[in-house]
Image (spheres, rainbow, N blue to C red):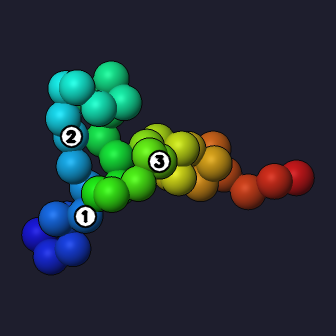
Amino acid sequence: MEGMDRITRHPDVMGGKARVRGMRVTVGRIVGPNRRGPLR
């Protein structure tokens, strides 16, 4: 899949959660608000 090289996982970094390469931001932190739906 093109562009997926930016998502990394490493057991010793951020508890093994998927994160954006080179940043201390988990994918869940970015996707989470969008997953819940729009604000009311």
Q: Residue furthest bottom?
A: 2
- Ranked by sequence position, the earlier of labels 2 and 3 is 2
Query: Residue at point 59% right, 54% down?
Result: 34
Q: Which residue is mark 1?
A: 6
**Foreground of the two, 25 or 4:** 25
Q: Which residue is mark 2?
A: 9
Determine crowd level at label 3: few under 14, some 14-19, many 20+ residues with C-alpha closer than 10 A: some
- Report the Cα–Cα distance between label 2 and label 3: 12 Å
> In this view of the protein, can residue 27 be seen by the observer?
no
Q: Which residue is mark 3?
A: 25
Q: Where residue 27 sits in the image (x, y, percent)?
A: 41, 48
Q: Residue furthest right?
A: 40
Is the residue under label 2 in contact with that under label 1 (CB below 8 Å)? Answer: no
Residue 9 image-quadrant placement = top left
- Report the Cα–Cα distance between label 1 and label 2: 10 Å
Figure label count: 3
